[in-house]
Image (cartoon, grey):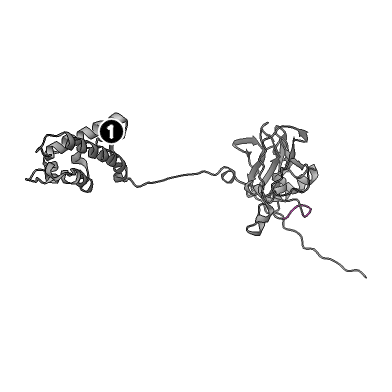
């Protein structure tokens, strides 16, 4: 085939770099961060370097001789620890200690409609048999003809995952790293080095602010108690019509007394007799449309029980304020 020459241009070295060792650490382990300068860097090294590990902020002095700084990770820390210097970023990943795996084994490969299925579940925590809370959801596959069904990794999309420029070895991406699917230490380290951005705290624990305003409608709170008392008023007026002497009529003052009796009877039964403001249902507080329903001419069934000289009901209530 012959031979040829391949000429490569020199790569551009950034002004600053941070190298973490190890990039895949464990809680409580010591991490070394090296500060590496490029040919374009000008200025002194920083006096201190900060490592943010979750909620904990650690600051240590930089060893000028070795141009490095050492941090000890918290014992219970899991996730991403980050450090910054002049635009450079250093990342350390601590995988979750408890890696859960679930194995589901059916007693049969296929089931007929209506047949009872028995499943055996086995949960392992860090490779050892251990207890775990498991939720099972059964879905008929024929529903996939109507809508796409979620796959086994659907809930994994709810977990914030780091962003990688390209998967390590073509398959090891950020989701595999976050969910603990990368078993080998070297493979996990390679995946960590490909990470270009990590989930921030506001992505994993977003703040939620809720503000709700509802319309205040006192009429709606008044309607039900009013009609309860009105029904009792009709019952008391019927009783009065049967027992009252012949020729006795019901004037506005008598209707006001019967309304008070209806209120008392409802209170005795435990019915609500107050409006939206907690005030008793006085006739003088009723809206015009509801007050009209308590007019003696609207409640009394026998016209002989009404006086010939009719006094305006609304005007009487406004004047007497019963």
Q: Depth check: 216 or 167 in front?
A: 216
Q: Nearer the viewer, residue 156 or 129?
A: 129
Image position, residue 203 (x, y; %): 58, 46
Is the residue 12 above or below the residue 32 in the image?
Answer: below
Q: Is residue 129 above or below residue 195?
A: above
In the foreground, 152 or 47: 152
Estimate the x, y position of residue 70 in percent, counting from the top left: 70, 36
Report which quarter residue 284 is drawn in. Answer: top left
From the top left corner, tell me how far across and down residue 210 is, in percent.
45, 44
User: Mark 1: which secondary structure?
Assistant: helix
Q: Quadrant of residue 258?
A: top left
Q: Residues within 10 Å of mark 1 (few under 14, many from 20)?
A: some
- Is residue 162 shown left or right of residue 2? left
Picture quadrant of residue 48 = top right
Tell me what residue is drawn at x 63 percent, y 57 percent. Answer: 147
In terms of secondary structure, what is the magenta stretch mainly?
A: loop
Quarter of the rendering occupied by the N terminus: bottom right
Tell me which residue sits at (80%, 44%) in the image.
186
Q: Residue furthest top?
A: 268
Q: Residue 304 magenta-drawn? A: no
- The answer to whether any part of residue 268 appears in the image is yes
Residue lying at 50% horizontally and 44% vertically, measured from the top left? 208
Q: Is residue 161 visible?
A: no
> Would you name the residue on which mark 1 appears?
266
* Furthest residue in direction right, as rendered: 1
Q: Which residues, given as a range, are shown in magenta? A: 166-170
Task: Name the residue at 68% across, 55% down.
Answer: 142
**Residue 183 image position (x, y, % from top left):** 78, 43
Q: Quadrant of the C terminus?
A: top left
């Amino acid at each position: 085939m012959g031979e040829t020459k391949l000429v490569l241009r020199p790569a551009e070295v950034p002004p600053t770099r941070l190298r973490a060792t190890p990039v895949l650490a464990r809680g409580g382990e010591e991490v070394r961060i090296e500060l590496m300068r490029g040919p374009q860097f000008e200025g002194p090294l920083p006096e201190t370097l900060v490592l943010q590990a979750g909620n904990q902020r650690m600051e240590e002095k930089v060893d000028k001789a070795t141009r490095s700084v050492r941090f000890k990770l918290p014992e219970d820390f899991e996730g991403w620890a980050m450090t910054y210097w002049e635009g450079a970023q250093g990342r350390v990943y601590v995988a979750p200690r408890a890696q859960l795996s679930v194995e589901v084994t059916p007693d049969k490969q296929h089931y007929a409609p209506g047949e009872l299925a028995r499943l055996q579940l086995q949960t392992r925590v860090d490779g050892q048999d251990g207890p775990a809370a498991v939720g099972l959801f059964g879905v008929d596959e024929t529903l996939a003809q109507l809508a796409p069904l979620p796959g086994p990794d659907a809930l994994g999309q709810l977990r914030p995952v780091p962003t990688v420029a390209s998967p390590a070895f073509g398959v090891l991406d950020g989701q595999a790293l976050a969910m603990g699917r990368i078993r080998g230490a070297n493979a996990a380290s390679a995946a960590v080095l490909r990470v270009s951005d990590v989930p921030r705290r506001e992505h994993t624990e977003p703040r939620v602010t809720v503000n709700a305003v509802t319309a205040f409608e006192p009429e709606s709170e008044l309607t039900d108690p009013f009609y309860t008392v009105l029904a009792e008023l009709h019952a008391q007026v019927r009783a009065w019509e049967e027992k009252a002497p012949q020729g006795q009529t019901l004037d506005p003052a008598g209707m006001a007394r019967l309304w008070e009796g209806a209120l008392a009877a409802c209170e005795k039964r435990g019915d609500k007799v107050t409006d939206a403001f907690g005030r008793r249902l006085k006739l003088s507080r009723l809206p015009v449309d509801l007050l009209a329903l308590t007019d003696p001419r609207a409640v009394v069934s026998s016209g002989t029980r009404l006086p010939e000289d009719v006094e305006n009901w609304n005007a009487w209530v406004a004047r007497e304020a019963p």
